[in-house]
Image: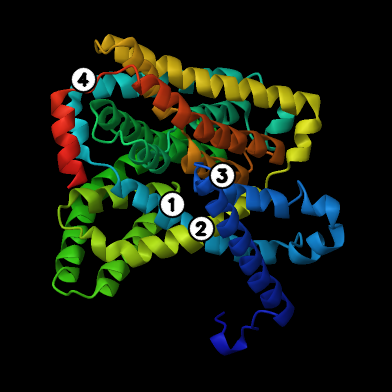
Amino acid sequence: MTISVTELPPIAAHQMLVFLLQLAVLLVTAFLLGRLATRLNLAAVVGELAAGVILGPSLLAHLLPSLSSWLFPPDPGQIHLLDAVGQLGVLLLVGFTGMHIDLDVVRRRGRTAALVSAGGLIIPLGLGVAVGTALPASLMGEGHERPVFALFIGVAMCVSAIPVIAKTLVELRLLHRDIGQLTITAAAVDDIVGWALLSIISAMATTGLRAGHLALTLGSLALVLAVAYLVGRPAVRVGLTRSNKTEDPAVTVAVVTVLTLASAAGTTALGLEPILGAFLCGILLSTSGLLDRRKLAPLSTFVMAVLAPVFFATAGLRMDLTLLGRPHVLLSGLVVLLIAIGGKFVGAYLGARLSKLSRWEGLALGAGLNARGVIEVIVATVGLRLGVLTTAGYTIIVLVAVVTSLMAPPALRYAVKHIAATEEEREREKVFSA
């Protein structure tokens, strides 16, 4: 039976009113706190998450419960409207993250990048899985198997945040340094593997931990990579070639948006996470050699100033810091935080030392790769959406993202002070500054 569009009832006036007010309140609070965070030399995401924390169950629900329940009612339809805006923002944000990756740099760094990224990936992943098997069941969503939960914690521990790392390196004037280039390269490799693992574990969370389902998921991942290479690359080249024939940036913005959303839809259709498709599309756009980043300025501004803050504020709404008042949640949070920080430091340090890098270079890599930022928040959001994490577990993972993003810049600055600049780096700085 088909239903005519004219027969569909419109969104109720009250539901639309609440939705518009939610967007307005979240955006203005996130924007102001994000600006305040940047003035304090913090990542904007810290202030944007804080906006959601203030407006959510951590504060507003306790201070003004009537206002809180009216503005953010526990109605699935209302929540899904807000989530739809956030999902659009996160897909475009992840697409931009993929555009930060230069596979040519990954290839050039060769053995050193491989060892550092492997250490920064495998050790935190292993430690995360180990701690995930011992965490209280209250952090794990009902109906999910312990191995899936443990693997999810492992993935959350091993990712890095290229946008936060790149921003930190630029602000500290370290992007031209060899250590800065190596940090970006290692983070790129870690994130490529991390997104793939997240998609595999997300599929396992919905289908169960079965050999047949795992094989099907791995087959889907292989198919995605094949389609990205055989179909995605030509589609990107055709789209960008056409858009480059006009000076109107609107064409490039539309092409990039369509390609990103179509890629996300493709991975979703195969039972994998939509963010994997968006991430792969970003890599294809970056490596095509045809992308005019200047034309993407309007889209970048809208995503970073509107859509991303709404997403992070919405993510903050789901945090409940009052849960940290429970001893077992607080203890679990401290353990996960220590594992996350220590695992990255040890892994990157060992990889650096095996590559014959100095002790201070190893510590600098550990400090830089520790910044989880936006990527960790996205991973936590996926876990909460799939029911792998409870609100308490979600709160812990997001706290790891915030704390590691706060500690990365000063730790990196301290380590790099002990690394002498080379003549080649000074010449590269002149090029970067030009």
Residue 46, disc: 3
Is residue 4 something one can see in this rendering? no
The residue that label 1 is drawn on is 274
In the image, taking residue 214 as reference, residue 76 lies left or right, namely right
Residue drawn at (61%, 67%), measured in percent from left and top? 23
Q: Earlier in the sequence, mark 1 or mark 3?
A: 3
Taking depth in this image into account, of 420 and 115 the one nearest to the observer is 420
Q: Quadrant of residue 142?
A: top right
In the image, taking residue 293 as reference, residue 47 lies left or right, namely right
The residue that label 4 is drawn on is 111
The residue that label 2 is drawn on is 87
Element class at badge 4: helix
Taking depth in this image into account, of 24 and 383 the one nearest to the observer is 24
Q: Earlier in the sequence, mark 2 or mark 1?
A: 2
- Distance, label 4 to label 1, CA atoms, is 31 Å
* In contact (CB < 8 Å): disc 2 and disc 1: yes
Residue 222 percent coordinates (x, y): 30, 40
Q: Earlier in the sequence, mark 4 or mark 1?
A: 4
- Distance, label 3 to label 4, CA atoms, is 35 Å
- Distance, label 1 to label 3, CA atoms, is 25 Å
Q: Is residue 243 above or below residue 290?
A: below
Q: Earlier in the sequence, mark 3 or mark 4?
A: 3
Residue drawn at (43%, 52%), measured in percent from left and top? 274
